[in-house]
Image (cartoon, helix red, strand yellow):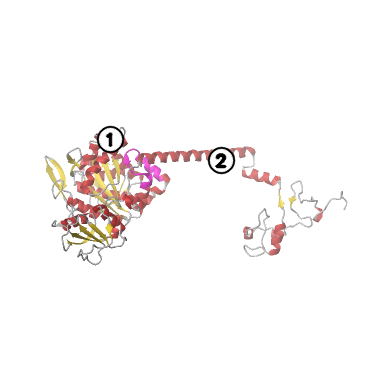
């Protein structure tokens, strides 16, 4: 072949030996032939969506069914050349950025500005969220039940497998007795059985406050704050809550895991932050003493469903002159349940924007010892508890009318019916109403036998166990009083009821046995899960 003679492809199109042609021409055209589309094949269709080999391909219509390409066309498709045309690329760029250079620059500046705003906004949002949650959720409390009580070593006593939150309301700055906690409400949550209960503690309940003599319970927090040596407000609040716990836990007989303290301002903001709450008011509330705060209307709330904003909700829960403290406590429980429903319906803790608004609204008018992780976990637990399963506990109405009013040195007080400082009936009621989650779930049958010469020991000990929520089904004496030095706890479940076993071991400070002692002569009722043989170590 003549070296000077140009190679010709189909239709006399010049090509190079390696298949590359300058001037934006096609790459990869075989020397022997080139593939071209028929006119009827240049119509777009759903066939264009069919997966193809890697590379760029012209739009083509398959003559086969959807998702399939006939074999002949597939072979041709593999031979189809790639076109690189610099002018096409420039056209696409001009189309993307507005064509005219000035338009392109303006658009680019706008995009950059938008990106900067997003970055700044995101940083501001993150900072705002961080500061809000830091001020509100300081941490410090702990409840094993938030981790489903998986670690038995954390369960020190019955009741630890619940979440007990003490909610306190105070007047705050600008109100007389600003640190007196006139609202004391215990919210107790059972995350294992999906139940909860609200218990109001009367503010006038007469108690012993460690290191401060005897006084109404609403003064314990104030005393703790006044006598605190902490250098900041948060430290003073911690000391105040510590003194209140030391005062209240022996009265109720259960542990307190977390606290929330809010003043009037925080309560109003809390209700407003969720857009108000709806309460089915059981009876009309009439109180002329606070009518001036209600546009000079003495009717604070009419009977039936009422929607309260922050201001009207506060009036409803703080009114007391025309009703009793007990009636006010019930109104507070109604509003708290309504607030729970509204917060969950909004999905507050599932929405970062809403939770930031929520936290910012509360500001520094509320104190809690929750961590953000802890409150988020509690929120998810409460979401699974229907309002119908939130009970309201009352210690003034039959059959549990355990408290009464009295006059002590000119002071109007509330005291147990059993006598001043005798809280045994209260504790029995509270611990049985707020049974430990796993004691309630396992509900093990317990038999108690007295092996000592102390008369009535089995009866008194079984009464105590019942007050902690144990299911005592048999009480008696062993056939012979052997006066063993140590109490024996026998587990007949083979370790199946491990929480009851753990609590009994903690209570009697002994390890459990798997079978009854030989020669004991004891025949427990059928179905008994644990047998307790009392020794001389039991007081």
Q: Residue at x 56, y 39 (%)?
A: 112
In reply to whether residue 113 is colored magenta, the answer given is: no
Residue 75 is left or right of residue 3, and the answer is left
Front label number (1 vs 2) = 1
Q: Earlier in the sequence, mark 1 or mark 2?
A: 2
Separation of residues labelled 1 and 2 (CA atoms): 49 Å
Query: The magenta stretch spans which residues?
Result: 354-375
Instruction: Give 282 or 343, whichever is nearer the viewer.
Output: 343
Instruction: Say whether residue 519 is left or right of residue 338.
Output: left
The answer to if 360 sits in the magenta stretch is: yes
Q: Nearer the viewer, residue 438 or 384?
A: 438
For the residue pair 495 and 411, the one nearer the viewer reads as: 495
Which residue is tagged 1? Answer: 173
Q: Nearer the viewer, residue 348 or 163?
A: 163
Residue 418 in the figure: left or right of residue 182 = left
In the image, residue 107 sits, relative to residue 492, either above or below, namely above
Residue 287: image x %, image y %? 21, 44
Across and down, in percent, residue 520 comes to: 20, 63
Task: Kindly check if marks 1 and 2 are in contact, taking CB atoms under 8 A apart as contact.
Answer: no
As helix, strand or loop, the secondary structure at mark 2 comes to helix
Q: What residue sits right under mark 2 in the picture?
A: 111
Q: Which element carries disc 1, helix, strand or loop?
A: loop
Residue 286 x/y as whole percent: 21, 46
Measured along the vertical axis of the image, is residue 188 above or below residue 359? below
* Image location (x, y in percent) of residue 513: 27, 59
């Amino acid at each position: 072949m003549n070296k000077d003679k140009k190679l010709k492809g189909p239709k006399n199109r010049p090509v190079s030996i390696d298949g590359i042609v300058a001037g934006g021409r096609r790459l990869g055209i075989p020397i022997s032939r080139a593939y071209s589309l028929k006119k009827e094949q240049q119509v777009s269709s759903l066939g264009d969506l069919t997966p193809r080999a890697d590379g760029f391909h012209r739009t083509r219509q398959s003559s086969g069914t959807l998702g399939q390409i006939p074999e002949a066309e597939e072979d041709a498709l593999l031979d189809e050349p790639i076109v690189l045309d610099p002018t096409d690329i420039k056209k696409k760029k001009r189309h993307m950025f507005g064509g005219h250079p000035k338009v392109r620059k303006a658009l680019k500046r706008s995009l950059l500005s938008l990106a900067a705003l997003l970055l700044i906004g995101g940083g501001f949002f993150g900072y705002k969220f961080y500061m809000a949650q830091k001020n509100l959720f300081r941490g410090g409390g702990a409840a094993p039940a938030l981790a489903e009580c998986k670690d038995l070593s954390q369960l020190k006593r019955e009741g630890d497998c619940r979440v007990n939150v003490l909610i306190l309301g105070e007047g705050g700055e600008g109100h007389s007795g600003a640190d007196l906690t006139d609202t004391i409400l215990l919210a107790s949550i059972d995350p294992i059985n999906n139940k909860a209960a609200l218990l109001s503690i009367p503010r006038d309940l007469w108690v012993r406050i460690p290191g401060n003599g005897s006084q109404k319970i609403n003064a314990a927090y104030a005393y703790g704050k006044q006598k605190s040596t902490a250098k900041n407000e948060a430290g003073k609040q911690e000391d105040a809550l510590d003194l209140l716990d030391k005062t209240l836990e022996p009265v109720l007989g259960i542990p307190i895991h977390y606290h929330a303290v809010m003043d009037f301002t925080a309560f109003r903001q809390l209700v407003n932050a969720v857009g108000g709450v709806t309460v089915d008011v059981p009876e009309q509330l009439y109180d002329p003493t606070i009518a001036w705060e209600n546009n000079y209307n003495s009717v604070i709330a009419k009977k039936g469903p009422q929607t309260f904003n922050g201001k009207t909700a506060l009036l409803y829960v703080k009114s007391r002159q025309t009703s009793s403290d007990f009636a006010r406590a019930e109104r507070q429980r109604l509003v708290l349940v309504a607030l729970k429903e509204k917060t969950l319906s909004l999905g507050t803790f599932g929405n970062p924007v809403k939770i930031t608004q929520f936290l910012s609204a509360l500001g520094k008018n509320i104190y809690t010892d929750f961590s953000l992780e802890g409150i988020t976990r509690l929120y998810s637990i409460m979401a699974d508890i229907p309002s119908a399963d939130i009970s309201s506990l009352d210690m003034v109405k039959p059959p549990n009318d355990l408290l009464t009013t009295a006059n002590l040195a000119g002071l109007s007080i509330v005291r147990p019916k059993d006598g001043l400082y005798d809280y045994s009936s209260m504790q029995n009621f509270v611990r049985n109403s707020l049974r430990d989650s796993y004691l309630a779930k396992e509900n093990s049958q317990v038999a108690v036998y007295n092996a000592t010469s102390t008369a009535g020991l089995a009866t008194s000990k079984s009464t105590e166990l019942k007050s902690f929520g144990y299911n005592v089904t048999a009480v008696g004496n062993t056939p012979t009083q052997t006066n063993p030095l140590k109490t024996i706890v026998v587990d007949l479940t083979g370790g199946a009821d491990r929480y009851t076993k753990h609590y009994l071991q903690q209570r009697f400070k002994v390890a459990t046995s798997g079978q009854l002692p030989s020669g004991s002569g004891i025949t427990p009722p059928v179905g008994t899960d644990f047998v307790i043989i009392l020794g001389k170590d039991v007081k």
